[in-house]
């Protein structure tokens, strides 16, 4: 009897959320003494000290269940924003509240509408609820396209997700634009206004009381950004009473831990921490907006605690990888469909400086025709004929890369160099006498930097006759004239080309 569980098609299609790289990954994987993380829009000052003290105290009572209604926190929020307490629902981060809304309001035959790119969990949770996710492209200025969003709505639309400011571009909708969007939505659609970054905006925000009072808008708020509690998981939403009640039916009873409730309550009152955070973010953004353009990176207007920038002569993956190797973590936006953009969170002054110095150094490498990723290359890569961008490593399953070279030996050598580069991600000391042979498979060494993606990575090198001479290890750079090479990875059974930014023609 076949007793294997059946995972429904719509769940099988979901891709796991890929978080940004961590400071530990950079330090342990690359052996760096320190690393700077400007990739996940966290609070650069750290958590509110008052919140930390409150959470420590709450730990002592952790044998008891938390208050399932988060009563004190909801009361404080209701008072601060002048909204009825019944309209406030607390959650384990706004990520959980997005999931709760999707499960409360969506299902097969219904749909949710959102921009693409925008926060990835909107589409994912709509799909997880068995509904359709309809995405509208951004405007040429990288903002929400209101007409585009409305054009995707119909009588089956139940949720329209709008992050304001928009992640990852930082673009902002004015109060008037939000009102217009809400007014023009189909009758049964609810606008979910995700204000995760609205606290950093210097523009006037839509008035929460009147928004919620209209009965068709839910506002999502988080303690992860301004209040510095991303790891504690604390957020809330303001919803019309009927929707708040539906969310309370769907959510887990103890979805917000006692520590998160205590921390959030204390953070709300830590005005000093809030002011210091705002100042640090605004000054950081000002510094970045001034220092990046002279380096050839265009920056885009933002109302969040991050900004989007172009990547000069690099691809987004290339620049993010090059900076990672220097201990500065930024977010490549290639997975958001923006292969020439990165997102940078405003950091402390010294962190922002490390970023700009890192970019300067990479530009120098580029100008001297030295591959940025080879900054840490050991003797194994000496003699490499020319630059090749970093190999985009973002798979979650064990991956096989196939390097194929055509023509003279230079191209195959280059493919091999790409393979070496993959080794470099894992280990600085590959034996210099390793040479590829036809059909040879190489198992990558177990390595902390690769732990996230796989412990069983392979590179398959294939050669096309005439069989070339591979000079690696001999210190003799290849001299092939007509070089053509390609690298591919397996993705869901298909062979997908891996984009190599530069190609040497010795
Ligand atoms: C637009 C947006 N909404 C929500 C979230 C999730 O925040 P939380 O930590 O509250 O789950 C993020 C996280 O980065 C975000 O960018």
Image: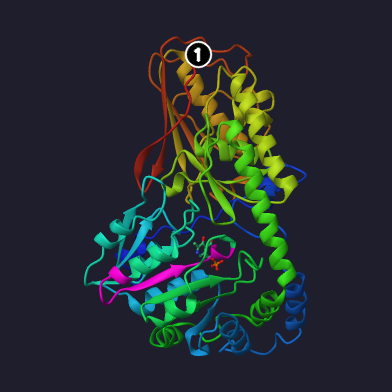
Q: What percent of the width, then of the height, locates residue 500?
A: 46, 30
Q: Quadrant of residue 184?
A: bottom left
Please tell me which residue lies in front, 409 or 214: 214
| Residue at (59% x, 46% y) in the render | 330
Q: Residue at x 65, y 68 (%)?
A: 229
Is 112 included in the stretch rendered in magenta? no
Quarter containing the N terminus: bottom left
Above/below status of 19 relative to 483? below
Task: Give the quadrant of residue 231.
Answer: bottom right
Q: Is 153 displayed left or right of 45 in the figure?
A: left
Whole-percent x and y of residue 304? 55, 57
- Image height of 262 relative to 20, above or below: below
Q: Which residues are magenta?
A: 183-199
Residue 130 seen in the figure:
no
Q: Which of the 4 image quarters holds residue 433?
A: top right
Ligand 1 within 8 angstroms of badge 1 C-beta = no
Which residue is most to the left? 155
Mark 1 neighbour density, 10 Å: few (under 14) some (14–19) many (20 or more) = some
Could you tell whether 475 is left or right of 150 in the image?
Answer: right
Picture coordinates of residue 32 (x, y %)? 74, 42
Identify the secondary structure beneath mark 1. loop
- The one nearer the camera, 462 or 115, is 115
Q: Is residue 192 magenta?
A: yes
Judging from the image, the colouring scheme is rainbow
Q: How many marks?
A: 1
- Does the image show residue 506? yes
From what the image shows, is residue 145 above or below residue 73?
above
Look at mark 1 in the image and give the residue it sits on: 469
Position of 27 with respect to 88 (left or right) is: right
| Residue displayed at 51% across by 45% down | 300
| Spot occupied by residue 245 in the image (x, y as percentages of width and height) | 42, 88
């Amino acid at each position: 009897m076949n007793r294997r569980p059946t995972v429904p098609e719509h769940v099988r299609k979901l891709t796991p959320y890929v978080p940004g790289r961590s400071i530990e990954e950079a330090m342990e994987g690359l052996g760096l003494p320190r690393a700077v993380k400007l990739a996940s829009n966290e609070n650069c000052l750290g958590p509110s000290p008052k919140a930390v003290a409150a959470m420590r105290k709450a730990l002592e009572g952790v044998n008891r269940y938390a208050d399932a209604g988060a009563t004190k926190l909801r009361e404080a929020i209701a008072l601060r924003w002048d909204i009825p307490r019944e309209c406030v629902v607390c959650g384990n981060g706004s990520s959980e509240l997005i999931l709760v809304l999707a499960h409360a309001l969506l299902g097969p035959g219904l749909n949710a509408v959102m921009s693409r790119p925008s926060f990835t969990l909107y589409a994912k949770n709509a799909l997880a609820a068995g509904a359709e996710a309809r995405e509208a492209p951004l405007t040429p200025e990288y903002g929400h396209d209101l007409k585009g969003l409305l054009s995707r709505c119909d009588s089956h639309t139940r949720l329209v997700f709008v992050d304001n400011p928009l992640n990852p571009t930082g673009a902002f909708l004015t109060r008037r634009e939000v009102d217009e969007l809400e007014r023009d939505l189909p009758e049964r659609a609810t606008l979910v206004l995700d204000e995760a970054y609205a606290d950093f905006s210097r523009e006037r925000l839509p008035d929460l009381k009147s928004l919620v009072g209209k009965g068709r808008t839910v506002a999502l708020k988080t303690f992860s950004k301004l209040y510095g509690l991303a790891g504690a998981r604390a957020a809330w939403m303001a919803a019309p009473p009927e929707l708040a009640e539906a969310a309370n039916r769907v959510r887990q009873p103890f979805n917000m831990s006692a520590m998160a409730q205590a921390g959030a309550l204390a953070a709300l009152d830590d005005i000093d921490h809030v002011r210091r955070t705002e100042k640090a973010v605004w000054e950081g953004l000002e510094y970045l907006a001034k220092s990046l353009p002279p380096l050839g990176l265009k920056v885009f207007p933002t109302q969040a605690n991050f900004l989007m920038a172009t990547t000069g002569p690099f691809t987004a993956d290339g620049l993010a990888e090059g900076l990672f190797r220097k201990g500065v973590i930024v977010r490549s936006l290639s997975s958001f469909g923006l292969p020439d953009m990165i997102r940078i969170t405003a950091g402390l002054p010294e962190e922002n400086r490390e970023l700009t110095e890192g970019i300067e150094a990479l530009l120098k490498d580029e100008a001297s025709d030295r591959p940025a990723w080879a900054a840490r290359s050991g003797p194994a890569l000496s003699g490499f004929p020319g630059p090749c961008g970093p190999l985009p490593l973002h798979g979650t399953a064990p991956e096989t890369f196939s390097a194929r070279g055509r023509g003279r030996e230079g191209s195959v050598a280059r493919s091999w160099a790409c393979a070496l580069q993959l080794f470099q991600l894992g280990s600085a000391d590959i034996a210099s006498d390793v040479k590829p042979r036809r059909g040879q498979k190489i198992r990558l060494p177990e390595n902390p930097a690769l732990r996230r993606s796989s412990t069983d990575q392979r590179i398959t090198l294939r050669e096309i006759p005439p069989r070339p001479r591979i000079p690696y290890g001999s210190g003799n750079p290849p001299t092939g004239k007509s070089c053509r090479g390609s690298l591919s990875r397996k993705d869901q059974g298909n062979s997908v080309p891996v984009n190599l930014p530069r190609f040497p023609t010795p």
